[in-house]
Amino acid sequence: MTESLQPAWEPWQHEYRHGAFYLFPPADVAAGVNELRARHDPKAAAICDAHISLSEPLGGPLTVEQLEELRAALAHIAPFELSYGPLTSIGPVPGVVFAISPEDLFFALRGAVQATSIFAGRDLTRASRVPHMTVAEFITLDETRELVARLTDTVPGGTFLCDRVTYAVPDGSFHFEPVLEIPLGSN
């Protein structure tokens, strides 16, 4: 994405113009989650495919030096199995998500990414957010309760190997596109 702001974007979206780091599940897992997203929250589905947010939005374009620093940091983290499910909501915030575990390994990965110079001197407001994979977020609290109750026993969770971090950047229509994958444990 360019330095310029996109006039068609909502104000909150501009913070993301340089992208962020995510965990994207493999195609088979993504297909099921994307189907749920499209059915229950088309607005969220249009923004990004199934993902787990890992970092704060970047404050500027990713440099070659920052990328090399990130590669070095991730080389020391072995791939690990992530579990998603059950479906739940996060406290008083509207939205339906798959819980993600183990949280300690996720937080260690997030910490390694956000300890790089990419995020130096930044207020890391999302650093303690519970890991989750969103199904629906642009819904009300009543819709949240109804959807969790309706889907809890019918939508299974699962596992997948977390073996890479993905850098994704929004296009002009604010749809996040993966532009770079950085493997874990390449040391």
Image (cartoon, grey):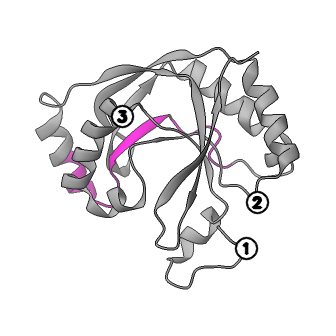
Q: Which corner quadrant of the image does residue 57 belong to?
A: bottom right
Indicate yes or no whether the magenta region holds residue 135. yes
Indicate yes or no whether the magenta region holds residue 76. no
The image shows residue 85 at horizontal and vertical percentages of 32, 26
For the point 53% across and 23% down, the residue is: 103
Please give the label number shown on residue 120. none
Residue type at numbered disc 1: Glu
Query: Between tags 3 and 1, which lies in front?
Result: 3
Q: CA distance from mark 3 to mark 2?
A: 28 Å
Of residues 78 and 84, the one nearer the viewer is 78
Q: CA distance from mark 3 to mark 1?
A: 31 Å
Query: As displayed, is residue 182 above or below residue 41?
Result: above
The image shows residue 116 at horizontal and vertical percentages of 82, 38
Highlighted range, magenta:
125-145
Residue type at numbered disc 2: Pro
* Among numbered discs 2 and 1, the one appearing first in the sequence: 1
Q: CA distance from mark 2 to mark 1?
A: 8 Å
For the point 30% across and 30% down, the residue is: 28
Give the residue pinned by disc 1.
Answer: 3
Circles 2 and 1, Cβ within 8 Å, touching? The answer is yes
Please give the label number shown on residue 27. 3
The image shows residue 92 at horizontal and vertical percentages of 38, 48
Query: As displayed, is residue 77 above or below residue 96?
Result: above
Relative to residue 168, is residue 114 drawn left or right? right
Give the residue pinned by disc 2.
Answer: 61
For the point 63% across and 50% down, the residue is: 20
